[in-house]
Image: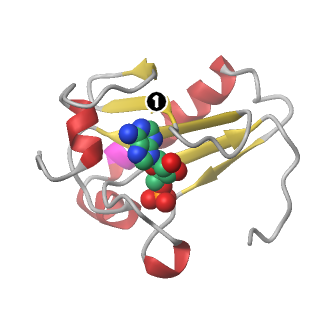
């Protein structure tokens, strides 16, 4: 747990968030600057700087993050129409929060490749 990390502070309740789903190990909340009608962030409660670090250290936890991403897509009813799971990793991907997180984006059509 890092008090410098915004998402750790959301996990410990110091910063409010609109939580949509929670397990013992994973938290899912709405992105504060939604880029789509559904834009949910799914994070491990323990701190890893990015998805690759999480998967290397704890593959089961990485699997739980993916499973919760699928669950919240169902909660927002975008599972039938489709959605995107995105793990921005590093500067070229414009990662801005260095706590592993999966963006779940849906509710509108999306282009490929992303900009
Ligand atoms: P990334 O650019 O992949 O690191 O994504 C970080 C995401 O966190 C961005 O989409 C932000 O809008 C989102 N974000 C930042 N602060 C908060 C917050 N306090 N609550 C919810 N989402 C946030």
Question: Quick check: 41 left or right of 43?
Answer: right
Residue 83 in picture, x, y percent from top left: 74, 42
Taking the view exactly as shown, the residue that stands out farthest to the bottom is 92
Question: Quick check: 79 left or right of 74?
Answer: right
- Identified at 84% across, 53% down, the residue is 110
User: Hey, which quadrant is residue 28 in on the image?
Assistant: top left
- The residue that disc 1 covers is 29
User: Hey, which quadrant is residue 11 in on the image?
Assistant: top left
Relative to 37, is 35 above or below? below
* 51 is within the stretch colored magenta: no
| Residue neighbourhood size for the residue with mark 1, other residues' Cα within 10 Å, grouped as few (<14), some (14–19), many (≥20) | many
Q: Is mark 1 within 8 Å of ligand 1?
A: yes
Instruction: Say whether residue 101 is visible.
Output: yes
Question: Quick check: 40 left or right of 17?
Answer: right
Q: How is the image coloured?
A: secondary structure
**Number of labelled discs?**
1
Q: Main secondary structure of the magenta part?
A: helix
Instruction: Say whether residue 63 is visible.
Output: no
**Residue numbers of the magenta segment:** 60-64
């Amino acid at each position: 747990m890092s008090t410098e990390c915004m998402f750790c502070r959301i996990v410990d309740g110091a910063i409010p968030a609109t939580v949509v789903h929670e397990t013992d190990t994973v938290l899912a909340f709405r992105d504060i600057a939604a880029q789509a009608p559904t834009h949910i962030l799914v994070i491990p409660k323990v701190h890893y700087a990015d998805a690759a670090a999480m998967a290397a250290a704890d593959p089961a936890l990485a699997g739980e993050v993916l499973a919760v991403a699928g669950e919240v897509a169902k909660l927002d009813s975008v599972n039938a129409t489709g959605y995107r799971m995105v793990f921005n990793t590093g500067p070229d991907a414009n990662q801005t929060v260095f706590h592993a997180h999966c963006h779940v984006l849906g509710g509108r059509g999306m282009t490929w490749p992303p900009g």
